[in-house]
Amino acid sequence: MLVDAHNHIWDVPWPPIGPDVMAGNTSRFLHQMDENGVQYAIVVCHLDEHDPNNNANALARAKEFPDRFRIWVNVHLYKPDALDRVNEFAGADGLVGVSYYKPFSPEDEGAWMQPGPLFDRIAELGLSVNLALAPMDQPKLRALAAAYPSIPFFVCHLGGPARNGQPVAEWEEVLRSAEVENIHIKISGFAYSTLHTWEYPYPDVLPYIERIYRAFGAGRMLWGSDYPPTMRYMTYRQSLEVIRTHCTFMPDADRAQVLGGTAARVFKLDH
């Protein structure tokens, strides 16, 4: 089973992000999935400032296509209403967790990254947490995840190993997070760490993927296309083949885990 564990859908034009104004259209994404044999997509909602209805619309798509979509709703975890927002979506069809992009909120100092009613409720609901974090936030994540071993936590886009092709020294903290068993990492957005976004299959990024593999193991790695933003740099098929063809340091069984087995297990997807 192939499972795309990081992608976005939206029903409004958003030219700065997609390769064209309607790149996030659901039917177009389903076409890409079908063309490449991808059964499920775990959709990341994070566009509420641009598309206030993205959470509701994505959940509607999951209800319409229950055998194709699962949803991480966007919740700004640092805001006072975060718990209310979690409760708002509790029990929705297709919901697997909440997602938050901390780097998009410069005013967020990370005070929410500690045990309390918010994460008590997330654990009670059996949800997961998808996070975009700076590498320097990883020690707080480790402490939080250790306090809630039943919550699967997911780190986006390799944890940000490089900027414009230049290594981020703090990224070693991402590898240290492998010490906490319920922290997972998504092999997505590879082009964001390369020096040359057109140089598929990104030979300067593949060593970071190998280091993640050595630290986390295939059982905590999940492939994600980052459709549609990453389509500015590669095709959907190429986003898949970065793992399937070019991660030659993994045996076939481990590649199968990264490309869908891990997600199928964590999210209890039907085969």
Image (tube, rainbow, N blue to C red):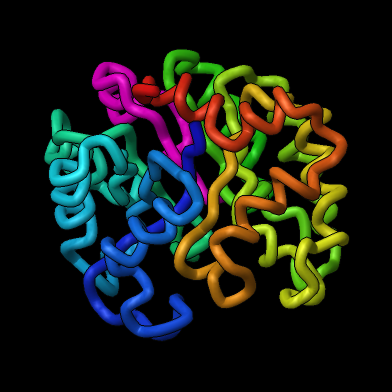
Vertical relation: 80 (above or below) 205 = above
Q: In the drawing, does residue 130 fall left or right of residue 78?
A: right
Q: In the drawing, does residue 253 fall left or right of residue 232?
A: right
Vertical relation: 81 (above or below) 235 = above
Q: Position of residue 76 (x, y in %)?
A: 33, 51
Judging depth in this view, the residue of 36 and 125 nearest the camera is 36
Q: Quadrant of residue 271?
A: top left
Q: Position of residue 88 (x, y in %)?
A: 12, 40
Q: In the drawing, does residue 219 fall left or right of residue 58?
A: right
Q: Position of residue 64 (x, y in %)?
A: 14, 46
Q: Please report the residue visible at 33 percent of the width from the left and 54 percent of the height from the top.
A: 45
Q: Quadrant of residue 239?
A: bottom right
Q: Please report the residue visible at 35 percent of the width from the left and 22 percent of the height from the top.
A: 270
Q: Please report the residue visible at 53 percent of the width from the left and 60 percent of the height from the top.
A: 103
Residue 156 can be seen, yes or no: yes
Q: Position of residue 106 (x, y in %)?
A: 49, 65
Vertical relation: 161 (above or below) 182 = below
Judging depth in this view, the residue of 139 and 19 nearest the camera is 19
In reply to whether residue 17 is colored magenta, the answer given is no
The residue range painted magenta reads 110-133
